[in-house]
Image (spheres, rainbow, N blue to C red):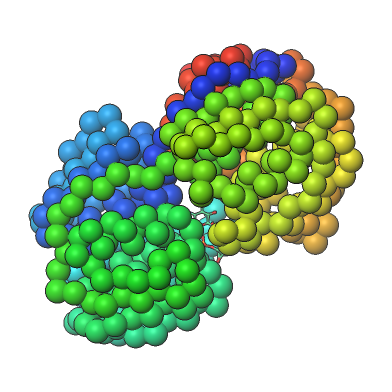
């Protein structure tokens, strides 16, 4: 398994280009199942998760042609409605094929995605939503089976905002008979991007980006070209890295409108943030102010930025309270930061108190999930000495060529095979 070796102490400077968003690409690529023809995607990030969903679609009978950051999926040859355990276990977001398969074929069998390091990750809201649209759901031998002659539009109320739940049901409702209304829907930019693509295919959707999304079913959807939006979490990751190293970085090809929560918090720590069109300049500050954060559904501060921000707070002046309100176990990275000399105490499972220390010390650490690995890279950049991070396959799932991007910014970082 690959490792990442970092010799800390460099201030990041220069320019970095943001890749397409993983969490936009996955539902968008899944939506190609709805089309009896080709769907073409550009600005697709080159990630393990993208390879996983391509493998899954090919296993269902679709054909995928890809080169660099381009992907073409032809859904007309899909001849299987079962997403197998071996493929789903590699990536939980495979659940996103469930809604499209039921909508187009009236039947789907998808392996129940397991939990992961950050939590149990149930899919009960996905399933109760499909039942509301008339699907018969059974769970046997670790597989979800959904059967529906034809989905029928209905009202669906989410107990709490669910990103992939909203995406799954929005896709399913596009081909249902009649109108569906999703209430307490998630409002992430990736949902708006998916709705825009579905509307381009011929779907009738109103309200994406708000808590109430109305979908009027149509007979079929047609082939379109789709450009993947920039990755707001990759953008935030490089912003925090620039602040943590007291650097001066230009982040290009991003969408500032999607990261208001991150920008306001970073400014509160004393960094300078300037926005010009699709470029953000982050200039660090030698003295980092400690601030409190609470993760919330969009447009609140994103849970996918919590680990990276915790690293920044480990060297801030004063104490920071970090409240993780979305997932029940998303502080695994704290244990690794403690090994690097951070001063963090966790109470009641989802509240962490971070007391700023002067410096982190380099150490051998282990990544546990995608965003935790990013927080450990940032810690390695600011620690004195050589940090080695193992299990970096977690990072390869969601960050395209991250060590190359950081070394272009002056970091002393390399991948060890
Ligand atoms: C999406 O996961 C993202 N993944 C996650 O990013 C992100 O952390 C998360 O949204 C929250 O923003 C993709 O988009 C592929 P949820 P998702 O359903 O949809 C509970 C990353 O690092 N819940 O919005 O799985 C759930 O347990 C990944 O890129 C239910 O109880 O998250 C959680 O506590 C990590 N029942 C909360 O809702 C359900 O049926 C929000 O989860 C569904 C969710």
* In this picture, residue 93 sits left or right of residue 150: right
Q: Nearer the viewer, residue 192 or 41?
A: 192
Q: Residue at x 76, y 28 (%)?
A: 285
Q: Is residue 322 above or below residue 202?
A: above
User: Extreme right residue here?
Assistant: 318
In the figure, residue 164 lies in which quadrant?
Answer: bottom left
User: Extreme front residue here?
Assistant: 276
Q: x and y percent of residue 30 in the render?
A: 29, 55
Q: x and y percent of residue 242 in the render?
A: 64, 28
Q: Nearer the viewer, residue 179 or 350?
A: 179
Q: Residue at x 56, y 47 (%)?
A: 259
Q: In this view of the protein, can residue 22 be seen by the observer?
A: yes
Q: x and y percent of residue 33 in the render?
A: 22, 59
* In this picture, residue 34 sits left or right of residue 262: left
Q: x and y percent of residue 4 in the render?
A: 57, 23
Q: How many marks?
A: 0
Q: Is residue 202 above or below residue 76?
A: below
Q: Residue at x 89, y 40 (%)?
A: 318
Q: Is residue 257 above or below residue 181?
A: above
Q: Residue at x 67, y 22 (%)?
A: 247
In the figure, residue 5 lies in which quadrant?
Answer: top right
Q: In this view of the protein, can residue 136 be seen by the observer?
A: no
* In this picture, residue 173 sits left or right of residue 23: left
């Amino acid at each position: 398994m690959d490792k990442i070796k970092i010799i800390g102490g460099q201030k990041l400077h220069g320019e970095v280009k943001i890749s397409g968003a993983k969490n936009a690409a996955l539902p968008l690529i899944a939506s190609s199942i709805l089309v009896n023809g080709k769907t073409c995607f550009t600005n697709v990030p080159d990630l393990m998760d993208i390879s996983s969903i391509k493998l899954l679609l090919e296993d269902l009978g679709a054909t995928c042609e890809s080169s660099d950051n381009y992907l073409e999926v032809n859904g007309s040859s899909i001849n299987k409605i079962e997403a197998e355990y071996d493929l789903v276990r590699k990536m939980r977001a495979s659940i996103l094929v469930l809604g499209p398969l039921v909508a187009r074929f009236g039947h789907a069998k998808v392996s129940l995605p397991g939990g992961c390091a950050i939590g149990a990750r149930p899919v009960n809201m996905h399933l109760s939503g499909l039942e509301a649209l008339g699907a018969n759901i059974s769970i046997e031998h670790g597989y979800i089976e959904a059967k529906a002659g034809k989905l029928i539009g209905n009202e669906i109320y989410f107990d709490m905002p669910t990103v992939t739940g909203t995406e799954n049901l929005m896709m399913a409702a596009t081909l249902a008979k009649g109108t569906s209304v999703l209430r307490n829907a998630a409002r992430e930019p990736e949902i708006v991007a998916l709705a825009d693509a579905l509307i381009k295919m011929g779907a009738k959707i109103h309200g994406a980006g708000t808590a109430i999304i109305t979908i009027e079913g149509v007979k079929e959807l047609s082939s379109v070209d789709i450009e993947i939006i920039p990755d707001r979490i990759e953008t935030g990751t490089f912003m925090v890295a620039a602040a943590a190293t007291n650097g001066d970085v230009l982040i290009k090809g991003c969408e500032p409108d999607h990261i208001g929560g991150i920008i306001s918090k970073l400014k509160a720590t004393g960094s300078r943030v300037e926005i010009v069109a699709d470029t953000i300049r982050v200039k660090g500050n030698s003295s980092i102010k400690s601030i409190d954060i609470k993760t919330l559904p969009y447009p609140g501060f994103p849970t996918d930025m919590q680990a990276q921000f915790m690293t920044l707070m480990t060297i801030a002046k004063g104490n920071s309270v970090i409240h993780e309100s979305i997932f029940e176990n998303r502080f695994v990275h704290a244990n690794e930061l403690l090994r690097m000399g951070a001063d963090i105490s966790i109470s009641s499972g989802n509240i962490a108190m971070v007391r700023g220390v002067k410096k982190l010390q380099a150490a051998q650490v282990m990544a546990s999930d995608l965003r935790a690995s990013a927080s450990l890279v940032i810690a390695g950049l600011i620690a004195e000495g050589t940090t080695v991070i193992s299990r970096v396959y977690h990072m390869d799932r969601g960050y395209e060529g991250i060590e190359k991007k950081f070394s272009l910014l002056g970091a002393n970082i390399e991948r060890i095979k």
